[in-house]
Image (cartoon, helix red, strand yellow):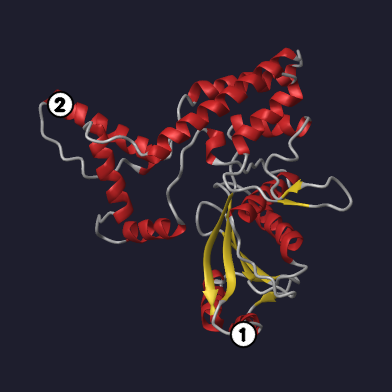
Amino acid sequence: MGLESALESALWEATRPAFRVRYIHDLNGQPLIPLYASYGSASGKTARAKLARIVRRAPEVLVKVTGRQKGGRHVKAHLEYIGRKGDVEIESRDGEILTSKEDIAERAAEWSDTLQWRSRPTVSSVSLVFSMPARTDPDKVLGSVRALAHAEFSDNHDYVMALHTDTPRPHVHLTVQAEGLDRTRFNPRPVQLSRLRERFARELRARGVVAEATPRRARGQGIAGSSMALVKLRARLRAGSSGQMTDADRLTNEQAIAVARGQAALPAFVANGTEKWQEIRKAYRHAASALDATGSTEDREIASDVSGFLDKHQGMNATPEVFAAHHSRLLNRASLLKDVIAPDQPPPEKERSR
């Protein structure tokens, strides 16, 4: 297998979308073009750079839908939240800064009034968050989202954005009017979120920020298993005085204890993920061999990094596996100490994020 074929094969195995691929016709180019960007443009130097970023653990962008607002009151409340009731600037599509409650109320009303022709209440706006790890330049995060929003939405959808720096991770709240000028609806699906992640990473790299947008499996990580609602619920519970667990964490915990005791097997998706990871590892190995064979110092450095990455990531790091391993260690420790243990708590957060 040649170098280019090996690189493209590795990136295809690692980043091909889990959703069904749709195609469009391009009258000025090839007849079929995939509606996602994650691997299609990765060839030659681009493929080398992408593979290097993956194995060198470049910071991954985070893009999530955080909510959908219905009606003027809901939109107004959301805009007041992202604007921290006047303490944070809200920037419009045209670069205008919404500075007063009246500005916010007017924008919320505009977005809702366009829906009056519809027969029943529907979503007025969709809110997303674009985030990067701590110590990333906040201004570059904002600039990247500004460029992304202009390219993706400005022709058809109104939007506003606000930069938050009150947490270690700088992040931008982008709220998009759901109803487009041509009455098409913005309702992001996995294919669109994948494209937005790719675009966000490209805009950051254009501003000198190392960033990547790959599926977890490309990095040897299993399904995260945490919806935004679950993340918010965990945060609320941590902020309270009780040590209450979420139902989702309790169920995962109980299943993990059963696995550790030999009373149950890991979920099927863990085995499927492990099988997929072995296929990706094989493709990465082929790419490393092809890079090493070129004799180029740069290519050999990437090949070495690929090998080191694979040595550190022998298997998938799926949440059920982490929980089960945690409780297995507790049970083994209890057996050695001849003690009785009731492992009713999940592993520490840092252990789950390895």
Q: In this view of the protein, which residue sits in the foreground, 127 or 316?
A: 316
The amino acid sitting under disc 1 is: Ala
Q: Give the secondary structure at mark 1.
A: helix
In this view, 183 is above or below 56: below
Q: Quadrant of the N terminus?
A: top right
| Left-right relation of 19 to 299 | left
Give the mark, 2 or 1, whose residue is nearer the N terminus: 1
Residue at x 59% of width, y 58% of height:
189
Q: Residue furthest right?
A: 28
Q: Whole-percent x and y of residue 29?
A: 87, 47
**Would you say residue 142 is visible in this rendering?**
yes
Q: Give the residue pinned by disc 1.
A: 109
Q: What is the number of the mark on residue 285? A: none
Q: In this view of the protein, which residue sits in the foreground, 280 or 347?
A: 280
Q: Give the secondary structure at mark 2.
A: helix
Q: Give the residue pinned by disc 2.
A: 335
Residue at x 65% of width, y 34% of height:
12
Q: Whole-percent x and y of residue 17?
A: 61, 44
The amino acid sitting under disc 2 is: Ser
In this view, 330 is above or below 170: above
| Left-right relation of 309 to 156 | left
Residues marked 2 and 1 touching at CB (< 8 Å): no
**Would you say residue 53 is visible in this rendering?**
no
Q: Gap between marks 2 and 1, in whole Å?
A: 64 Å
Q: Which of the 4 quarters of the picture holds residue 257? A: top left
In this view, 86 is above or below 189: below
Dot 1: few (<14), some (14–19), or many (≥20) neighbours within 10 Å? some
